Image: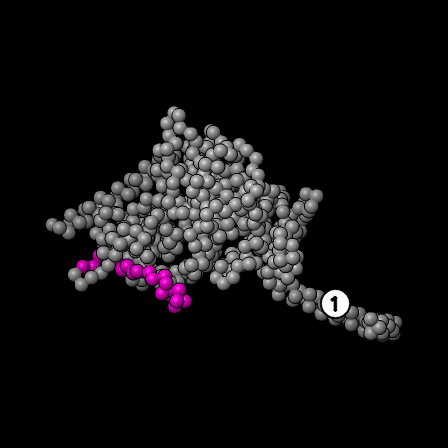
Amino acid sequence: MGQCNIFTEKLWRQFITAHAKCIVLFSTLFILVGAFYSTRLLQSNVISGGSALLSMLSTKAALTDSAGMPIKTSAKIQVQLDCTTLNLTGTCPRNHPSSFYDDQSRSSSTSPTCPDLFRWIHEDLRPWAHTGISRDMVERAKTTANFRLVILNGKAYLETFVKAFQTRDVFTLWGILQLLRKYPGKVPDLEMMFDCVDWPVVRSADYSGPNATAPPPLFRYCGDNNTLDVVFPDWSFWGWAETNIRPWEHMLSELKEGNHRITWLNREPYAYWKGNPDVAETRLDLMKCNVSETQDWNARVYRQDWVRESQEGYKLSSLGSQCNDRYKIYIEGSAWSVSQKYILACDSVTLIVKPHYYDFFSRSLMPIQQYWPIKEDDKCRSIKHAVEWGNSHKQKAQEIGKAASEFIQNDLKMDNVYDYMFHLLNQYSKLLTFKPTVPKNATELCSETMACSADGIEKKLMLESLVTSPSDTSPCTMPPPYDPPSLHAFLRRKQSLLKQVELREKKYWEGRHQ
């Protein structure tokens, strides 16, 4: 302390005797201190050592204070993980932004309209459009659910019933928590049941007829034409730990880079597939289409050994390095497969073996425009025709591949995935006829309770997919629902295009047999 006083006195004398020198000295000290502070701020990690660090970056944001009054700033708030508070108190931090408002310059009226795939939200929730969703309906969904999630005043509460396969539930929940960080205070109160198993179970036939009860609202990753399960983005958008697949935002970048390595014309002129054939009979059947000494169906299919891959560091399973063929095959496993989005992103013509299931975006895909349909009961001949057609119509084939990858890069970018989740949950919450409450067996869930105690690949994926800033724009604007004539026209057009391919294929094989 005495040294500080001596230093100050010296400076004061210099100020009296040499005013110009003082100005230079203080200016230098100010610059050095400022530079030191800025450097420390920029070096802060995603996980903070104390209370949540709110660091300023050069974009706009608008938050509210504890009294609910808007706080306008010219910088974006970065919210780090606060593991210290969690460790000290055993509770989720309370100093994260809890609400977010849009000023006139960022009102929802200026938000772009969401992609057409959002219109399926209306269709998925249509079974409850007139009845609403009662607590009894939600409770009946518990039969097969892995967990119940309650969102109340912007906070999440989890009640687990059955642990899901691998880390499906972990990264599904993590994704919803990131949605709460992206739009703090915007996600309404709700209570939902989630089933992480592949197969949809809410059969529409069980809830039809004049005396039928309303179906239970059950969220899962896929549906089919005979069920009423509510379709939600799958866990792999935030990473798939067991297969070393990174979060979707990173994968989109890798796949885009992979597309530029080899132009379509310079790729192998065959149909490529690599995966686990043992999960479904239809995949085992696909293996018969591989090239042999006596037959070439224009397919190159490979068995994926995930155990060996994990032992060898996943060197041969990089999705970004698998865009080397003009055609890529998508085929379902035991149900829908997460591989579809990665395959569609490759600029290759995606050959889709007739699917039985759909995820939240695939219903919007149109044959001949974004993919080429393949028969399920005659795969090999169908694949051979598709490849022959594409190699004979190179310009059109390239257009199909490019249209698919643009759909993935634009309509399925991560911002749109979050907006789909937001609008689905928002519309769902409007149907609830009861006030959500926290079950006695539930625990509060936040990013800290999941990421701070995680380790290895799970922690890595969580940190890579962590939303560190509230969005500075509103979610996209929901498009209107399909009216019956429009929906029927869309479905008729799809069927017409499928029929066109079927007739072309029939004519092709008839010509070869003449």
In which quadrant of the rendered view does residue 255 lie? bottom left
Identify whether 482 is placed above or below 418.
above
Instruction: Name the residue furthest top.
Output: 210
Q: Position of residue 3 (x, y in %)?
A: 82, 74
Q: How many marks?
A: 1
Disc 1 residue crowd, few under 14, some 14–19, many 20+, Cα 10 Å: few
Q: In percent of the image, x 50 and y 41: which residue is there? A: 192
The quadrant of the rendering that contains the N terminus is: bottom right
* Residue 35 shown left or right of residue 214 in the figure: right
Provide the residue designation for mark 1.
30
Q: Nearer the viewer, residue 236 or 156?
A: 156
In which quadrant of the rendered view does residue 299 lie? bottom left
Q: Position of residue 205 (x, y in %)?
A: 35, 33
Whether residue 309 appears in magenta in the rendering, the answer is yes
Instruction: Name the residue furthest left.
Output: 514
Whether residue 444 appears in magenta in the rendering, the answer is no
* Residue 7 shown left or right of residue 161 in the figure: right
In which quadrant of the rendered view does residue 188 lie? top right
Q: Please, which colouring scheme is shown?
A: one colour
Q: Nearer the viewer, residue 146 or 215?
A: 146
Check disc 1 and report its element: helix, strand or loop: helix
Q: Position of residue 409 (x, y in %)?
A: 43, 53
| Residue 356 visible, this orientation | yes
Q: Which residues are magenta?
A: 295-315
Q: Position of residue 467 (x, y in %)?
A: 55, 54
| Residue 327 visible, this orientation | no
Q: In percent of the image, x 26 and y 47: which residue is there? A: 376
Amino acid of disc 1 = Phe
Q: In percent of the image, x 50 and y 38: which residue is there? A: 428
